[in-house]
Amino acid sequence: MNNDITKDRELCLAILKEYTKSDSLLKHAFAVETCVRAYAEKFGEDINYWGNVALLHDFDYERYPTAEEHPFKGSEILKEKGFDDNFRQAILSHADYANIPRNNSLMKTLFACDELAGFITAVTYVRPSKSIDEVEVKSVIKKIKDKAFARAVNREDIVKGAQELGVSLEEHIQFCIEAMKRNKGELGL
C-alpha cells in the first residue's frame, strides 16, 4: 500500500471519527496531536506523520478500552488499512504495558504528550474563564500534586515523559501549553 496514507490527515481524521464518537476523546486526540506536531516542528521532523500518529494513538479506545485490547486492536485495524510498522509501533509504544521500547524521538514525544495534554485540558476546564490563556506552568504543577484532581491521569507518566524527552517538567509543560494556545479554537479551550 501507499505509505502516503501516514501523512494524510483527512484520512486519519476520518478513521478517528469512525471509531471515536466521544467529544472528550476527540478533543484529547486533537490536543495530543497539537503538542506532538509542535515538537515535530521543533525537532525538524515530519509534522504530518508525527501529527497523524498522535491523532490516531487512542482511536480504538472507545471500542476497545481494556489493556488487553487497546492499543493492540487499533494496530491490527491500521495494519489492515495499510499503515506501516513504524507508524503502528509508535502508537503501541504510548502504552507502557505494550512493552514496546520507546527508541526514537517520535515514540518518546507521543508518550510525553499523551497524559500531559489531557491534564492541561483538565486544568483549563477549572479556570474561571475555561480558557487556556489563563493556564500557567505553576498552576499545572500545583494540580499535579493534588491527587484528588483528575485522578485518572497518571502523574508518573507525565514526569517520566519529560525525563524521556530530556527536558525539565516545567519546560515540557510550558511547551505544551504554548502549542495548545496556538490551536485553542480546535481544542475548544
Image (cartoon, rainbow, N blue to C red):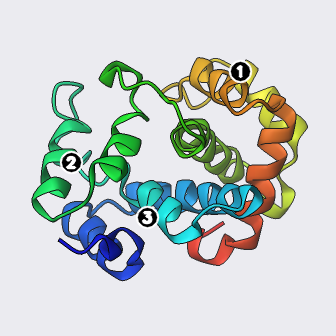
Q: Is mark 3 on a helix, strand or loop?
A: helix
Left or right placement of residue 152 versus residue 105 in this view: left
Answer with the quarter of the image where residue 169 lies: top right
Q: Residue at x 13, y 47 (%)?
A: 76
| Separation (CA) of disc 3 from disc 2 | 14 Å
Residue matched to label 3: 52
Instruction: Measuring from the top left, give residue 114's x and y in whole percent.
Output: 53, 42
Q: Looking at the image, which is closer to me, 183 or 74?
A: 74
Residue 98, how many percent across, how many down? Answer: 31, 24
* Residue 19 visible in the snapshot: yes
Foreground tag (3 vs 1): 3
User: At x 17% / y 25%, what residue is drawn?
Assistant: 68
Q: Is residue 47 above or below residue 145?
A: below
The residue under label 1 is 146
Sequence-wise first label, 3 or 2 = 3
Residue matched to label 2: 74
- Tell whether 161 sits left or right of 167: left
Residue 129 shows in the view: no
Task: Farthest residue to the left: give it.
Answer: 80
Residue 178 image-quadrant placement: bottom right
Query: What count of labels does the image hold?
Result: 3
Give the spatial CA distance, label 3 vs label 1.
Answer: 32 Å
- The quadrant of the image that shows the C terminus is bottom right
Element class at badge 2: helix
- Label located before the other in sequence (2 or 1): 2
Tag 2–tag 1 contact (CB < 8 Å): no
Relative placement, left or right, of 52 versus 103 is left
Q: Which residue is drawn at 85% across and 57% down?
A: 134
- Residue 63, how many percent across, how many down? 16, 48
| Amino acid tagged 3 | Asn
